[in-house]
Image (spheres, helix red, strand yellow):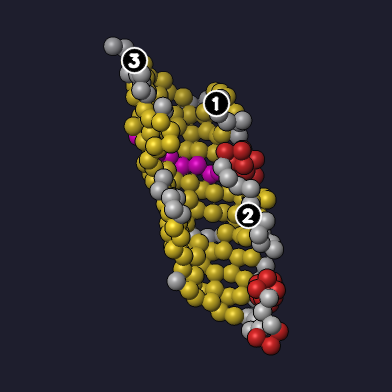
């Protein structure tokens, strides 16, 4: 059996990955590969406008090649990813997506012939994220907090969400299958603009309309 090691320092190596529309630029890292495995350590670079660093991976080669371990960090430019994601996921209700999402991949494993069975854990932190949804009167902004993401659920931890003149800290769990949603709101404030929009949609009689601002907390 043979084994080779490659150390990349200040590299300008670039490649095109078939499933993705952007160029992969690998600026540094350590690669060890042989007949039966490929190991990556300390890889950093960019995929399009999205950077990645501290990437480690172990790929077992053969008839049923599999990624047995992976970790790393990435900063995803959502304007770059949204057009591609629209073709891959049911995002018909999302009109636009912008901002940055910092992702720390803690663990990932998958068989390349069965990608739907992927197992992973990651923490995502929004950085001035804005999402425009068809059902809402204005974009929703996400500016703080985090989400722990796995293949089965998303767990929100005090994600700061705002729309029009309303804002709240959102925590809870969204199950991927079902789906099942358990959400809690804290430090919520409903302003006049959002309140009037909600009341109009609910067709609440004028004499029953509450006065803004309203403080909201719900579980």
Q: Position of residue 144 (x, y in %)?
A: 52, 60
Residue receiving disc 1: 17
Residue receiving disc 2: 131
Q: Kindly give the residue lying farthest to the bottom in the view shown.
A: 207
Q: Is residue 200 visible?
A: yes
Q: Nearer the viewer, residue 132 or 55?
A: 132
Taking the spot 36% from the left edge, 36% from the top edge, the residue there is: 109
Q: Position of residue 194 (x, y in %)?
A: 66, 72
Q: Nearer the viewer, residue 67 or 46?
A: 67
Looking at the image, is 88 positioned above or below residue 195?
above
Taking the spot 55% from the left edge, 26% from the top edge, the residue there is: 17
Taking the spot 52% from the left edge, 33% from the top edge, the residue there is: 45
Image quarter where the C terminus lies is: bottom left
Provide the secondary structure element on which disc 2 rests.
strand
Quadrant of residue 62 in the image? top left
Looking at the image, is 187 positioned above or below residue 210?
above
Q: Is residue 39 visible?
A: no
């Amino acid at each position: 059996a043979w084994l080779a090691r490659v150390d990349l320092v200040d590299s300008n190596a670039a490649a095109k990955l078939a499933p993705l529309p952007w160029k992969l630029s690998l600026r540094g890292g350590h690669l060890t590969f042989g007949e039966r495995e490929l190991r990556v350590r300390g890889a950093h670079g960019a995929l399009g406008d999205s950077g990645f660093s501290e990437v480690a991976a172990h790929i077992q080669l053969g008839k049923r090649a599999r990624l047995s371990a992976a970790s790393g960090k990435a900063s995803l430019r959502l304007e770059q990813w949204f057009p591609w994601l629209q073709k891959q996921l049911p995002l018909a209700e999302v009109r636009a997506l912008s901002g940055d999402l910092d992702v720390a991949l803690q663990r990932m494993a998958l068989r390349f012939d069965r990608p739907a069975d992927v197992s992973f854990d990651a923490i995502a932190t929004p950085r001035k994220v804005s999402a425009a949804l068809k059902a809402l009167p204005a974009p929703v902004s996400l500016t703080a907090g985090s989400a722990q993401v796995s293949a089965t659920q998303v767990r929100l931890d005090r994600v700061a969400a705002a729309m029009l003149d309303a804002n709240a800290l959102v925590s809870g769990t969204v199950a991927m299958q079902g789906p099942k949603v358990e959400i809690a709101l804290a430090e919520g404030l409903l302003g006049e603009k959002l309140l009037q929009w909600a009341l109009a949609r609910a067709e609440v009689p004028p004499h029953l309309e509450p006065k803004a601002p309203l403080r909201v907390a719900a579980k």
